[in-house]
Image (spheres, rainbow, N blue to C red):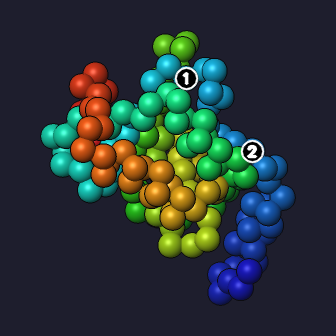
Amino acid sequence: MLSLRSNKTISIDKAYEKSPIMNPLPMVQAVSKVSFYSADSNAKDAPIVVPLSKYSELRTLFNNSKADPNPAAWVCSYCLFINLNSGEALTIGLFVTGLDIGALEINRKYYRGSNDTAIKAFFDRFTAAPDYSIDNTAPTSR
């Protein structure tokens, strides 16, 4: 990777390259509900529900993720809400990077994984459907 920044930045890039491959999203069995907002939605809109039967497909998009020790200021495209069977609720930011690899944030931890095109294609199926369901119980502030 060509960098015009200091040697310290190059060592951070090496740290990213050495990060183990993982999937930071919760296991399918642990999830009770999934919904999302897109950056294009109106602030008053309720989140759109992702059927649990489709969650494993979404999770698979992030199978080859790595921790990102030096995240950039990406534009958030989707805000994903995942409720766990334990009662815990996660809010996950999915970011447009304009690169071959996408980015996400979970509880202030950043990862690189999937890509802008795959993420957009997954969520477009729900926003384009005239019969998508909304989640009136999810947080409404963004």
Q: Which type of secondary structure does the marked residue at label 1 adopt? A: strand
Looking at the rendering, which quadrant does residue 9 occupy?
bottom right
Above or below, 124 relative to 17: above
* Pointer 2 residue: 22
Looking at the rendering, which quadrant does residue 103 occupy?
bottom right
Q: Which type of secondary structure does the marked residue at label 2 adopt? A: loop
* Circle 1 Cα neighbour tier, 10 Å, few/some/many (<14 / 14–19 / ≥20): some
- The residue that appears at 50% across and 28% down in the rendered structure is 52
Going by the image, does 37 lie left or right of 69? left
Going by the image, does 43 lie left or right of 105? left
Above or below, 6 relative to 136: below
For the residue pair 100 and 11, the one nearer the viewer reads as 100
For the residue pair 117 and 83, the one nearer the viewer reads as 117
- The residue that appears at 54% across and 51% down in the rendered structure is 104
Residue found at the far top of this picture: 86
Where residue 95 appears, as percent x and y from the top left, is: 47, 57
Where residue 38 appears, as percent x and y from the top left, is: 33, 50
Quadrant in which the C terminus is drawn: top left
* Pointer 1 residue: 31
* Circle 2 Cα neighbour tier, 10 Å, few/some/many (<14 / 14–19 / ≥20): some
Above or below, 35 relative to 63: above
Picture mark count: 2
Looking at the rendering, which quadrant does residue 112 occupy?
bottom right
Query: Alpha-carbon distance for marks 1 and 2?
Result: 18 Å
> Looking at the picture, which amino acid does disc 2 mark?
Met
Frontmost of labels 1 and 2 is: 1
Residue 100: give its label: none
> Looking at the picture, which amino acid does disc 1 mark?
Val
- The residue that appears at 52% across and 36% down in the rendered structure is 54
Residue 18 visible in this rendered orientation of the protein: yes
Residue 8 visible in this rendered orientation of the protein: no
